[in-house]
Image (tube, rainbow, N blue to C red):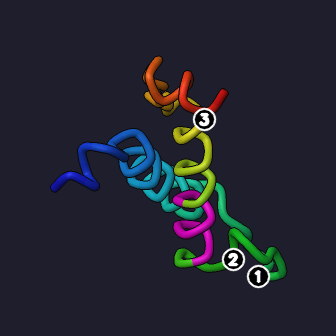
Amino acid sequence: MNFLKKNILTVSGVALGALAGFFYWKYVGCLSGTCMITSKPVNSTLYGALMGGLFFSIFKSDNKTVNKSSKEEGK
């Protein structure tokens, strides 16, 4: 559960991207079958999930704090 709370943006990006990839295949797709990504629903869904996860992970903030005492010890 801690993993989900920590990475909620990335997980939601994967879900939304997968949904967008599937709908892209369904409504746009590739009629000839020569397109690598959009010719099959699995490829399009996985590619959308990857892109969605990467895009949403940009907005994740790092909450790293440095204690003054540990900073002074390094001097």
Q: Quadrant of the N terminus?
A: bottom left
Q: Which mark is residue 39?
A: 2
| Residues at marks 1 and 2, CA–CA distance in whole angstroms | 5 Å
Q: Are marks 1 and 2 in contact (CB under 8 Å)?
A: yes
- Front residue (pair 52, 58): 58
- Which of the two discs, 1 and 2, labels the residue nearer the N terminus? 1
Q: Nearer the viewer, mark 3 or mark 2?
A: 3
- Front residue (pair 2, 73): 73
Look at the image and say whether residue 48 sits in the magenta stretch. Answer: yes
Q: Residue at x 53, y 51 (%)?
A: 53
Q: Residue at x 59, y 60 (%)?
A: 50
Residue 44 to residue 75: above or below: below
- Which of the two discs, 1 and 3, labels the residue nearer the N terminus? 1
User: Mark 3 highlights which residue?
Assistant: 58
Measured as percent of width and height from the top left, residue 43 is found at: 61, 76
| Residues at marks 1 and 3, CA–CA distance in whole angstroms | 33 Å
**Label 1 amino acid?**
Gly
Q: Residue at x 44, y 47 (%)?
A: 10
User: Mark 1 highlights which residue?
Assistant: 33
| Residues at marks 3 and 2, CA–CA distance in whole angstroms | 28 Å
Measured as percent of width and height from the top left, residue 58 is found at: 60, 35
Measured as percent of width and height from the top left, residue 8 is found at: 33, 43
The stretch in magenta equals 43-49
Q: Nearer the viewer, mark 1 or mark 3?
A: 3
Instruction: Give neighbour class at mark 2: few <14, some 14-19, many 20+ (Cα, 10 Å).
Output: some
Q: What secondary structure is found at the residue carrying circle 3?
A: loop
**Label 2 amino acid?**
Ser
Residue 59 to residue 4: above or below: above
**Label 3 amino acid?**
Ile
- Magenta region, main secondary structure: helix
Q: What secondary structure is found at the residue carrying circle 2?
A: loop
